[in-house]
Amino acid sequence: MSNKLELMLILIIFCTITGCAALVGAGAAGGAYEYQNKRQLDELEREFSDGIISREEYLKRKKQINEGSVIY
């Protein structure tokens, strides 16, 4: 009986650790994606303020970035 209990305990710990690792990995990937969106928005703002792109182009590209983002 003791061996079964130990095996179940090890299995529960293993599942908990791997589940947490998967969540951390997903969070890191999501964070990197949002960071990239922020960089794109910053670059877009710079191009617009420098007169490189028109207001129409700015609004179109900003909308595309916002549609792909959870935060922005």
Image: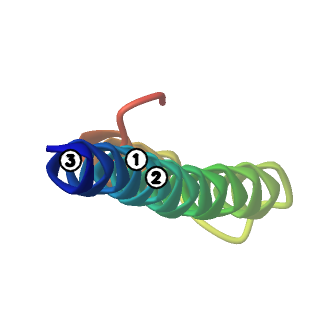
Is 46 positioned to the left or the right of 8 in the image?
right
Q: Is residue 46 above or below residue 1?
A: below
Q: Residue 72 at what x, y percent from top left?
A: 48, 30
Q: Which residue is denoted by mark 2 in the rendering?
A: 17
Compute the Cα span from label 1 to label 2: 6 Å
Q: On residue 8, which mark appears? A: 3
Q: Which mark is residue 13?
A: 1
Residue 70 against residue 33 in the figure, above or below: above
Q: Is residue 18 left or right of residue 24?
A: left
Q: Is residue 26 above or below residue 20?
A: below
The reply to whether discs 3 and 1 touch (Cβ–Cβ < 8 Å) is no
Identity, as a three-letter code, of the amino acid under mark 1:
Ile
Disc 2 or 3, which lies upstream in sequence? 3
Q: Amino acid at mark 2?
A: Ile
Q: Residues within 10 Å of mark 1 (few under 14, many from 20)?
A: few
Contact flag, marks 2 and 3 (Cβ < 8 Å): no
Q: Is residue 60 left or right of residue 13?
A: left
Question: Which label belongs to residue 46?
Answer: none
Give SS at disc 2.
Answer: helix
Residue 31: image location, x then y, percent: 58, 50
Q: Nearer the viewer, residue 57 or 37?
A: 37
Say which residue appears at 40% left-offset and 47% top-offset.
13
Q: Secondary structure at mark 3?
A: helix
Query: Camera-side residue: 49 or 67?
Result: 67
Between tags 1 and 2, which lies in front? 1
59 and 27: which is toward the camera:
27
